[in-house]
Amino acid sequence: MLNLSNEVKVGITVLLAFLVAVVGFRFMRDVPIFRQTVEISTTFDRGDGISRGSIVYVRGVKVGSVRSVSLTPENSVRVVMQLDGTTRVPKGSVAQLTSLGIVEGKSIVIRFSDSDEYVEFGESIEGVYVESMTEVLGSRSEEIAGDVSESLSELNTFLRQLNIAFDDETRVTVSETLESASRTTKQIASILEDKQSEIDSAIDAGSRMLSQLDTLATDSRPQIESIMAAIEENVNELETVRKELEIATSNLNEILEKINSGEGTLGKLVNDPALYENLNSLTEEMNELVKGINENPGRYLRHMSIIDLF
Amino acid sequence: MRSLTELGKYSNLLYQALRSSTEFSTYRKNLFQELVKVGYDSVPIIILTGIFTGSVMTLQSAYQLESAFIPLSTIGAIVSESILIELAAVISSLVLAGKVGARVATELGTMRVTEQIDALESMGFNSVSFLVVPRVLAGIFMFPVLYIVASVCGLGGGLAAGFFSGTVPPADFLQGARMYFYPWNVVFGFVKMFVFGFIITSVSCYKGYYASGGAEGVGKSTTNATVLSCIFVLLADFILAALLL
């Protein structure tokens, strides 16, 4: 240990303490100890939760801290931020007063603009106050509480009415109804018990019948199948018959057409009236001949003797 | 009644010290000696106290606040606030009450029972100015300096303890500490140490100056000086907190 005089020892102690105090103070105030800083300011509508030393972030990176918070004559909150000398804030950037978590304190987040010009020392940028979730809840809590209490009072009223409705008489009625219902249930149960064997046998008979039907169906299957096959065959034959009939009909049609058009013997017969007229006159002549024979058979039978005849 | 008498004698001694504080040439040499003894020589113990206070504070806060909903920075805030406002001042003062107070009381008590003070008086020295004033001045002046040492070591110790134990990362610790760093806290700490320095040295001087009854009397006055210093430090701490916060 150096042999220092008391005065020097005191001086060293005090000086070192002073230096440590100044450096420590600046350190704790988050003022860069050996670096230049940039001061820019912004104004918010309100400054809840922000105080000297609050942290300023850009894209989640800490770039500085709040140096002072004060109320302006226009009733807004002026916040002066102290940023690292290397941070350059574009003009038109927006400072948001926001909370990063539910329990964390408030911080300022600067959202950079695309401008090529930068904010100079002491200049001001726009500030926006972002309401946190707890604040939103807080501001709406009265409303919510009102709703809840209203619902509760309605529930209360309902319960009270229910209580009133359930006066002694009703209660007796309800319990009587319940009793009679239970009696009925018991009766049904006893009936079911009594008739158990009958029900069982009925079910047995039913199931037997069903099984018989089943066996019947199974046993007769080949017969049914052969019947079905025969029917199918007949249907096929009918089909061929139908085709032949069709051909016959078309042939007939052809013949009728020919007759109509006067072709062939039949056609001529049908279409030529000459034959009819010949026949007609023949018939008339025959009538006269028969008449003549009747009136005077000898004339025609003169040369005819019975002997000759036979 | 006895305590009133003591208060009167104490006040009288302070009055004499105040009146003779202008005789700077009488106590100049003694003052620097005392400044070294109170300040310079106490720095190691204060560093030790500070570091351990801070680190214990951090570990215990981390242990107590082990919850997902409490950010780690809260620990930094708690530790730094506690150290700056309370622990750096009070714990250091209690330690110094043992170190400085006991020494002052013993020195003066021994001088009293060996009749050195009477000898000074008979030689025409103002014994209060020669013995009491430099000690009280050294306390008033050096305690705030020691507060700086204690605070810095306490915060450093807290930071280091958080880092080495893995409970609180330094960045979180510093964020919390800075978030709740109010210069007034430091001023308050200075004021406290100023008052504590005065209390410890003046009470010890009083107890030593009026010691009687040989070696046993010196021992008794030393014990009394230390105990009373501690009590008055705690009392003053309460009063200052009630008045200034």
Image (tube, rainbow, N blue to C red):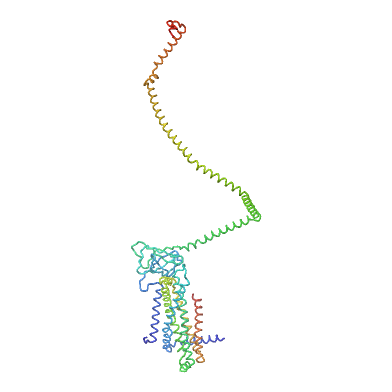
Identify which residue, B66 or A60, lies in the foreground: B66
- The correct choice, above or below, for A271 with respect to B48 in the image is above
Instruction: Tell me which residue sits at (39%, 78%) in the image.
Output: A20
Number of numbered tags placed on the structure image: 0
Q: Quadrant of residue A4?
A: bottom left
Q: Residue B207's spot in the image, x, y percent?
A: 50, 87
- Left or right: B38 with respect to B1? left
Vertical side of B104 occupied by A154: above or below: above
Which quadrant: the N terminus of chain B? bottom right
Q: Which residue is drawn at the image coordinates 50% and 42% (left, top)?
A: A219
Q: Position of residue B87 (x, y in %)?
A: 46, 77
Q: Nearer the viewer, residue B210 or B244?
A: B210
Q: Residue furthest left?
A: A116
Where is A226 relative to A135, above or below? Answer: above
Front-most of A259 and A245? A245
Tell me where residue A17 appears, x and y as whole percent: 40, 80
Q: List x then y, in percent, for residue A255.
A: 38, 24
Quadrant position of residue A285: top left
Q: Is residue A284 above or below residue B182?
A: above
